[in-house]
Image: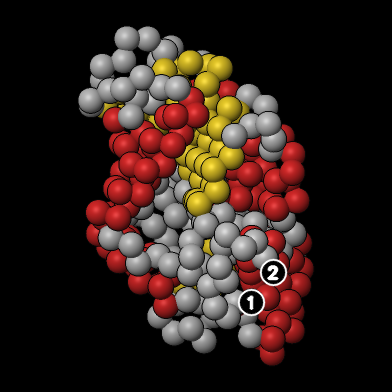
């Protein structure tokens, strides 16, 4: 998955997505936006984020619920996407995943995909209580890992009226098989088993780097593009980002298959943006479609 896009490309891509989702949700136009801090309860855990509204709205407007992908926090460009949605006349609810950023939750830096799916649903419930939101016109947006989450959410929660999945993580085990050397697997599985036993004994969770400058250094995203994007973005605008997740995050990712839910999304509109040179998450099925050329060795 390429992470080398610039700020201007972020804004252009966000503008394009905002226009498409606005068309689906039939939102009115607006010229400006306002932002306020928000927090809400998710099964006893407080999640925090931002709520954007178009400044010129005359009544309740459609809303987009958004969270970030693998380990990322909301300051890592989600604000720019939300601004474009607000400028298109929609509200946008952006939140940090549990255990990350401004949100509560323990163990810190643990990624539980099913807890994050449930948190999207909690965020939708919260959004429906806000007077600025048209409770019957709420969409979900996700990118990378959360791009997979919104496929699941759109399949199981019919309050969702539109789904946008940008470079979604669809088949996690297959993705890791492609990106981890075959001779590394026995050692990795042994480490995961040892961590499970250590946690059973009450010891602190084992950790692994999200990215590493050395592709052989041991990380969850060994691509050079991932190292560049995470470290440069963190330095530029997200000093709270932490280059570490629990080992159990990997174990849970191996069990998570959002692609299995895609057939249940209809009749809810779905927009899936697949990168032409995605070398991390591109679903195998899409590569067989003539309209989407194979991007080279996977």
The answer to which image quadrant residue 49 occupies is top left
Q: Determine if residue 273 is in view.
A: yes
Viewport quadrant of the C terminus: bottom right
Q: Which mark is residue 12?
A: none
- Which residue is depicted at the point 54% across and 78% down? 296
Callout 2: helix, strand or loop? Answer: helix
Between 73 and 196, which is closer to the camera in this rendering? 73
Callouts 2 and 1 close, C-beta under 8 Å: yes
- Outermost residue toward the bottom? 183
Q: Which of the colour schemes (rainbow, by chain, secondary structure, one colour) is used?
A: secondary structure
The answer to which image quadrant residue 29 occupies is top left
Q: Position of residue 108 (x, y in %)?
A: 53, 53
- Which residue is depicted at the point 50% across and 77% down? 222
What distance separates the C-alpha of mark 2 from that of mark 1?
6 Å
Badge 1, how many Cα within 10 Å: few under 14, some, many 20+? some
- Which residue is depicted at the point 55% across and 68% down? 293
Between 134 and 103, which is closer to the camera in this rendering? 134
Q: Position of residue 107 (x, y in %)?
A: 58, 53
Between 143 and 163, which is closer to the camera in this rendering? 163
Vertical comparison of 175 with 83: above or below = below
Q: Which residue is mark 2?
A: 174
Q: Which residue is mark 1?
A: 178
Q: Determine if residue 47 is in view.
A: no
Badge 2, how many Cα within 10 Å: few under 14, some, many 20+? some
- Which residue is depicted at the point 44% across and 55% down? 72
Q: Position of residue 64 (x, y in %)?
A: 46, 31
Q: Position of residue 216 (x, y in %)?
A: 52, 86
């Amino acid at each position: 998955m390429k992470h080398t896009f610039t700020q201007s490309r972020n804004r252009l891509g966000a503008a394009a997505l905002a226009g498409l989702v606005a068309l689906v949700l039939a939102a009115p136009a607006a010229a400006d936006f306002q932002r306020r801090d928000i927090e809400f309860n998710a099964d006893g855990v407080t999640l925090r984020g931002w709520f954007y509204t178009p400044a010129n709205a005359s009544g309740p407007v459609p809303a987009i619920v958004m969270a970030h992908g693998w380990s990322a926090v909301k300051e890592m460009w989600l604000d720019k996407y939300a601004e474009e949605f607000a400028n298109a006349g929609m509200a946008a609810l952006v939140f940090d995943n549990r255990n990350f950023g401004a949100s509560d939750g323990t163990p810190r830096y643990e990624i539980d995909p099913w807890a994050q799916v449930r948190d999207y649903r909690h965020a939708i419930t919260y959004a429906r209580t806000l007077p600025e939101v048209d409770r019957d016109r709420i969409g979900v947006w996700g990118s990378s890992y959360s791009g997979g989450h919104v496929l699941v959410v759109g399949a199981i929660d019919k309050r969702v009226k539109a789904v946008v999945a940008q470079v979604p993580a669809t088949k996690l085990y297959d993705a890791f098989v492609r990106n981890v050397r075959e001779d590394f697997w026995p050692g990795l599985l042994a480490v995961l088993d040892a961590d499970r036993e250590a946690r059973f004994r009450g010891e602190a969770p084992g950790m692994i780097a999200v990215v590493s400058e050395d592709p052989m250094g041991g990380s969850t995203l060994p691509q050079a593009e991932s190292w560049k994007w995470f470290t440069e973005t963190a330095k530029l605008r997200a000093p709270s980002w932490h280059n570490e997740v629990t080992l159990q995050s990997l174990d849970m990712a191996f069990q998570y298959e959002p692609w299995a839910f895609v057939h249940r999304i209809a009749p809810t509109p779905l927009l899936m943006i697949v990168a032409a040179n995605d070398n991390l998450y591109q679903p195998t099925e899409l590569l067989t479609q003539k309209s989407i050329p194979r991007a080279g060795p996977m």
